[in-house]
Image (cartoon, rainbow, N blue to C red):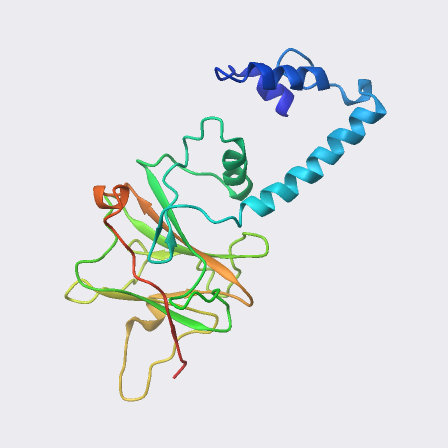
Amino acid sequence: MLNWWLRDNPREVGEEALLAQFDAVGFGPATAFELIRSSEATRRGLQRAIEDARAMLRAAARRPTPGIRNGWIFPLTLGRYGHDYLMRATVAFGGYANLLEETVYAALTGDSRGQPLRGEREYTLRFPAGARPPVGAFWSLSAYQSKDFSLIPNALERYSIGDHSEGFRVAADGSFTVRISRDPPRDPPRNRFRDRRENWLPVGEGPYYLILRLYEPGPSVLDGRYVPPSIEETSPP
């Protein structure tokens, strides 16, 4: 697949030496790759490269990144990678990314005390009045398992929540609270919060992380002024 792609697409300026190395191994843009024609040593080397690359991607997916706001990681270089091949591959390893002007993906891995998010704990994200995510389209919040970066199965089949979600409740002053937990939130005694179930994002067992997607992000997202709230652990009623 890589050989086919390199042969069918124009190369970037500055990649001549790198692609010449690929040609020498047999899968560069000037060659037609045939595994059967490769030497045994080349086959072993390619297999080793695949295994090493997977380990590099797993490590890169967990490395600290710049652009942290109140615990949220704001990667503002997605979609334009230049010669940062590891960043490009890391994004592709987990899915894909739109250009910055289309979508910003903010990630959160820990609570307000710096502890990893875990399924056996309950959390709330409180957006006060006037602090809703500044977007031209919509926003959404999703949870992913840390072990394999996949969405978390749940009985509701609810894998994201946001201002486009059916039944999502916002207070009269524009504030709202998102609840993240393994079990459905319950109303506390003598105080009925009707938005508890509607504004609930289910998670599973073990560690996970959150992705806040901002579609058509506003200027304050791009210049660093917008800061999402920290996530707070709550005790079950």
Q: Residue at x 27, y 54 (%)?
A: 227
Numbered label tally: 0
Q: Is residue 224 above or below residue 109?
A: above
Q: Residue at x 21, y 58 (%)?
A: 131
Q: Say left or right for 117 vs 19.
A: left
Q: Residue at x 14, y 65 (%)?
A: 173
> x, y percentage for residue 26?
71, 17
Q: Say left or right for 145 vs 33.
A: left
> x, y percentage for residue 51?
70, 39
Query: Quarter holding the N terminus?
Result: top right
Q: Residue at x 25, y 51 (%)?
A: 226
> x, y percentage for residue 231?
36, 65
Q: Nearer the viewer, residue 78 or 196?
A: 78
Q: Nearer the viewer, residue 83 or 214?
A: 83
Kindly indicate the quadrant of the structure image that contains residue 198. bottom left
- Outermost residue toward the top in this view: 30
> x, y percentage for residue 109?
45, 58
- Outermost residue toward the right in this view: 40
Kindly indicate the quadrant of the structure image that contains residue 229. bottom left
- Outermost residue toward the bottom in this view: 190
Q: Say left or right for 107 vs 219.
A: right
Q: Nearer the viewer, residue 50 or 195?
A: 50
Q: Is residue 115 above or below residue 94?
A: below
